[in-house]
Image (tube, grey):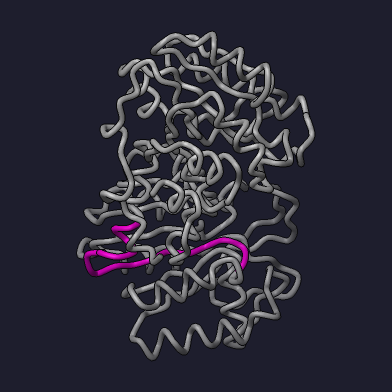
Amino acid sequence: MTSSDQRPSTSIRSLADLDVRHRVVFCRVDYNVPLAAGRITDDRRIVASLPTLRVLIRNGARVLCASHLGRPGGEVKAELSLAPVAERLGERLDVPVRFAEDCIGDAAEALVASLAPGEVGLLENLRFHAEETRGDDAFARALAAPADIYVNDAFGTAHRAHASVVGVPALLEERAAGLLMEKEIRSLSRVLDAPERPYVAILGGAKVSDKIALIEKLLERVDSIFIGGAMAYTFQKSRGIEIGDSLVENDKLDLARDLLERASARGTKIHLPLDHKSAASIDGSRVTEVRDEANETIPAGRIGVDIGPATRAAWIAAIGAETRTVLWNGPPGLFEAAGCEQGTRQLAEHLATSPAFRVVGGGDTAAAVARFGLADRFDHVSTGGGAALDFLSGATLPGVEALR
């Protein structure tokens, strides 16, 4: 299946196609939210699920939500319980949300039995059972047992062949995409298969190796690619430019040279940083002695942490009012660190006013535009980092295929 097959079509049903009244709907959601001391620090994924849940509630479904949280490795870990999520979901929906202390067995059955039409329950963390990530058939049957209908609104897990993503829909004849899942597929398909030109891509992140397939796919489609973040240093070193102690993939230098040559042969313009911000040290999001480097070179003992002012000005000028489509996947700098956020912030502010169709490809870029209060100024901000990357790279997503 190609990526063009993945857009919503008659082969994937929508919520409007379902008769959910009085029926139990197993709704796979993505509540993998950040927690600190048991408190949710960012509930964007919860908020993103609300439109689908409200449709199900309004139409009298008995809604059984299921999600994972973190990587408990098949063990029950109190700090990764979804109990705080149930409380926050109830606040956001303005209705009580009942919670089951397990996702299968007696606790799950009791939760379902307690739900009246229009009520919502949340099962405990699916990954407390190792069978979830193994895609175990028996575990999928246990999850599906109390349900009549399957709805997947968790695009962020669509690239995983897990039991709740592919096993449960295989067991329930009636299945559909939620509103968020539909919007993800529709928006990402538009930039992948039917973009208006000029079409530009902005790529960042740590490693070229994480985005090889995406870059190769984009070379066939875009007019320009802007490469920032740590991955830019691999490209620059492949050109013989000194990059100091910046993060680099030495085993990918030949690949970087090859990608640059292929882009040149296709007439695709590659924009690399003209100057940088550098730091003396990095420890997580803490940096020391941030300063500007006036050209492409980063001195020994210094680490690149952001694009510099000349690069920001050049890139913003190049992504002008005539640009019709923008895909942004990866920030150009360590935006979480003080003094290193200007590149990401100024790009976000510029794109927020652009007339182009603008898609943010999830992950750190989504976190960045949210941090700057600009998420609602983009046409689509994906909730799926890895899933969006795979989709845009042309890969088949098991969670999408399972809805057919």
Kindly tell me whether residue 351 is visible in this rendering: no
**Picture residue at 63% right of the left edge, 17% below the top:** 100
Q: Going by the image, does 169 lie left or right of 161?
A: left
**Picture residue at 44% right of the left edge, 53% below the top:** 401
Picture coordinates of residue 51, whole percent (x, y): 35, 28
Picture coordinates of residue 165, whole percent (x, y): 53, 43
Of 310 and 205, the residue lying toward us: 205
Kindly tell me whether residue 291 is visible in this rendering: yes
From the viewer's perspective, is residue 81 above or below residue 109? below
The answer to which image quadrant residue 20 occupies is: top left
Picture coordinates of residue 256, whole percent (x, y): 56, 82
The answer to which image quadrant residue 14 occupies is: top left
In magenta segment, residue 340: no
Q: Which residues are magenta?
A: 189-207
Picture coordinates of residue 8, whole percent (x, y): 30, 49
Q: How many numbered marks, from 0 up?
A: 0
In magenta segment, residue 205: yes
Of 95 and 401, the residue lying toward us: 401
**Picture residue at 46% right of the left edge, 36% below the top:** 172
Q: Going by the image, does 166 lie left or right of 190?
A: right
The answer to which image quadrant residue 142 occupies is: top right
Q: Quadrant of the N terminus?
A: bottom left
From the viewer's perspective, is residue 150 above or below residue 81? below
**Picture residue at 50% right of the left edge, 23% below the top:** 64
Of 333 and 113, the residue lying toward us: 113
